[in-house]
Image (cartoon, helix red, strand yellow):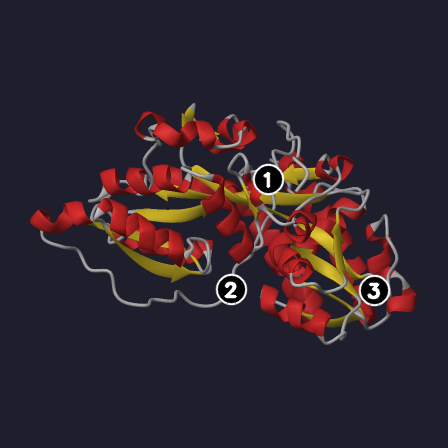
Amino acid sequence: MTKLVLNRRNTLHLLGGSAGALAMPYIIRPLPSWAQSTVLNVTTYDKFLPQEFLDKFQKDSGIKVNVRLTDDQGKQYNLLAAEGANPSTDMVTVAGHRYSQFISSNLLQALDTGKIPNWKNLNPAYQNAPWARVDGKLWGLPILAGYEGLAVNTNYVKDPQSWDVMFDPQFKGLTSYIVSDFMTITMQYLGFDGDFVSYTDKPEEALKATNAARDHLIKHKDMVRKYYDAGSEVQQMFINEDIYLGHAWSGPAAKLIADGHPIKLSVPKEGTYGFCYTLNVVNNAPNAENAYKLLDAILATPEVGASMQRQSGFASTISGVPEVLTDIERAAGTLPQEQVERIVFFSPVNRDMKNEMIDKATAEVKAA
């Protein structure tokens, strides 16, 4: 993988989405105080923590790691909020743009990098990322980064430069996207602020921009084979050649590329959005010291980051990972630098207005 040069504006926001219910391999229950030191309870997404890594960590540390799977940020938030001062999990996996929600509710504790000797192995672009700091404090270890891109089957679509191609009549019925996510991309494509940062205290302006994107998607609804919700759905549509192009998160698309399918992922000239997943220590976590041991182990070697990237499809934040990936793995997770510069991190600013307007417009597109 070619090394990506990241700056304050992009710091690489390779992303994901939400989906079904909280999956629990088993129920995490509080242990008596005498047993706390040998346990660590982690809530994270499927395939984010490779089993081989967990097995080695447990063997080396003597700490038993209980993993509870989730696929939605809101469910993690609701669980922590409901448990209050007695959390059943020590660590959660939060997307950077959702920090303000968790922090304002006092659900996370600020990260003490002094307890992470291998912190130096984190890519410096992530060590210094402004989005990772709130009130001057760092709140989590960035582990995987993702972005929204234009995925195409290269057998049928040749090197598009603009989101225009998603509305090109020659591909009628051969496109797909997550409506709520592509709504913000469409706003960007039409010249509006799809992240709503500039619309703070300007609801009328925000509504006008949102409705313009809504109307554009309704006008071009015949372009869409199917609206999808999960990454596995868009992967299967590409494999079956039900679609030739679509809006996709980098993780699912990168997996297709790494598996040898004729897929290419790019960031068109109008730009896109992204985010970074972080591992966060929960406020009042009974096993916080064990959480720090796990964070340090993740940063110990590039091989851990490479394994996380292979399994998830999202890009690792750990220095040296590109050097231990195969050529096809590097190709799957690499963008030309000029495209990296087009990625803007989701901001936590004005999220309530954005969510309310995008949710309403999404429902109207689906109902049209």
Query: At numbered mark 2, what does the secondary structure look like: helix, strand or loop?
Result: loop
Q: On the image, numbered disc 2 is attached to which residue?
A: 19
For label 3, the crowd category at 10 Å Cα-Cα, with few meaning under 14, some 14 to 19 and many 20 or more, is few
For this view, does 205 lie left or right of residue 91?
A: right
Quadrant in the picture for residue 235: bottom right
Q: Nearer the viewer, residue 220 or 368?
A: 220
- Marks 2 & 3, CB-CB < 8 Å contact: no
Instruction: Compute the Cα span from label 2 to label 3.
Output: 27 Å
Q: Is residue 219 visible?
A: yes
Tell me, for residue 323, which label it has, or none: 1
Quadrant in the picture for residue 69: bottom left
Question: Mark 1, mark 3: which one is toward the viewer?
Answer: 1
Give the amino acid type for the residue marked by disc 2 in the picture: Ala
Instruction: Compute the Cα span from label 1 to label 2.
Output: 33 Å
Q: Is residue 336 above or below residue 137?
A: below
For this view, does 288 lie left or right of residue 308?
A: left
Q: Earlier in the sequence, mark 1 or mark 3?
A: 3
For this view, does 357 lie left or right of residue 167?
A: left
Q: On the image, numbered disc 3 is attached to which residue?
A: 219
Instruction: Compute the Cα span from label 1 to label 3.
Output: 46 Å
Give the amino acid type for the residue marked by disc 3 in the picture: Lys
For label 1, the crowd category at 10 Å Cα-Cα, with few meaning under 14, some 14 to 19 and many 20 or more, is some
Q: Is residue 173 above or below residue 88?
A: below
Give the amino acid type for the residue marked by disc 1 in the picture: Glu
